[in-house]
Image (tube, rainbow, N blue to C red):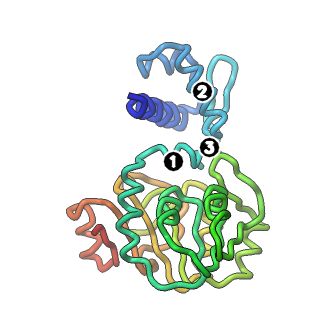
Amino acid sequence: MADVANLFVLERYHSISDYLKEHGRATVEELASILYVSPATIRRDLAAMQKLGMIKRTHGGAIHVEASEEVSIFMRMESDGEEKEQTAALALNHIPEFNSIFIDNSSTALALAERMDFTYKTVITNGLQLAQKLSGRKNIELFLLGGSLHSSSGSTNGGFALSQLHSFRFDLMLSGAAAIDKNGAYEKSLSTQEIKKAAFAHSEKRMLLVGESKFSLKSTFRVAELDEYDIICTNAKSELIKEYKDAGFRIFNK
């Protein structure tokens, strides 16, 4: 029952976020009426969403904040958990040989990294959760990029992080995406796009991890065209990715 309750909470968060993006602001009473819940429930939701960096509270309601486009990594880890686990599990079968690797702060890349053996490998990341999880492993050379700390997305970025990336060359890059279509992989914020584009430019091979839901989403900042990725892994159904395979993209779902 707890999992079901958490799902309903996440659905409300998404609905509130979408409404604020469209209208800019809303009152507690307005959101309660739209979502068919009590004002007390909405107040709790808004308090939690503000802590996650998704919205900004106002007297009697909330407003949309541009920075909230980067949804909290904790929420991303909860949302579509099965999708991420499926994508990570199948991606294990397609990882090329590497000695050095950049892994972004995406929750799907985190799910995959938890399954990988990094013994005597060099790992560079801007993901706080990933760095914490790998820090206890033996015989691994681990680097966390410095820079501006974004607690909501669990990442570092900005000019300082970008300058450090130019000091590396990677055999492999593992990254997720906020959205995907036949024209490329996209992110919701410019700062995330900049980090990924820099890592992309310094990587010999690039692997993209996207769950099925990302094919129906839209985002603004394109990281790269799909044919620039060496491997794309997804849990999406074969009929959904058929047009991508027909277009010549190296996309795998099994």
Q: Which mark is residue 46?
A: 2
Query: Circle 3 sits in a helix, a strand or a loop, which is it?
Result: helix
In the shown orientation, is residue 210 left or right of residue 100? left
Among the two numbered marks 3 and 1 on one chain, the one whose residue lies closer to the N terminus: 3
**Residue shown at the point (63%, 31%) measured from the top left:** 63
Nearer to us: label 3 or label 1 = 1
Q: Tell which circle, 2 or 1, labels the residue nearer the N-terminal end.
A: 2
Q: Quadrant of the N terminus?
A: top left
Q: Position of residue 87 (x, y in %)?
A: 38, 61
Q: Disc number at residue 68? A: 3
Tell me: residue 132, above or below residue 169. Answer: above
Classify residue 25 by image quadrant: top right
**Amino acid type, mark 2:** Leu
Q: Which mark is residue 76?
A: 1
Q: Residue furthest left?
A: 239
Give x and y (percent) for residue 65: 64, 39
Looking at the image, is mark 2 or mark 3 earlier in the sequence? 2
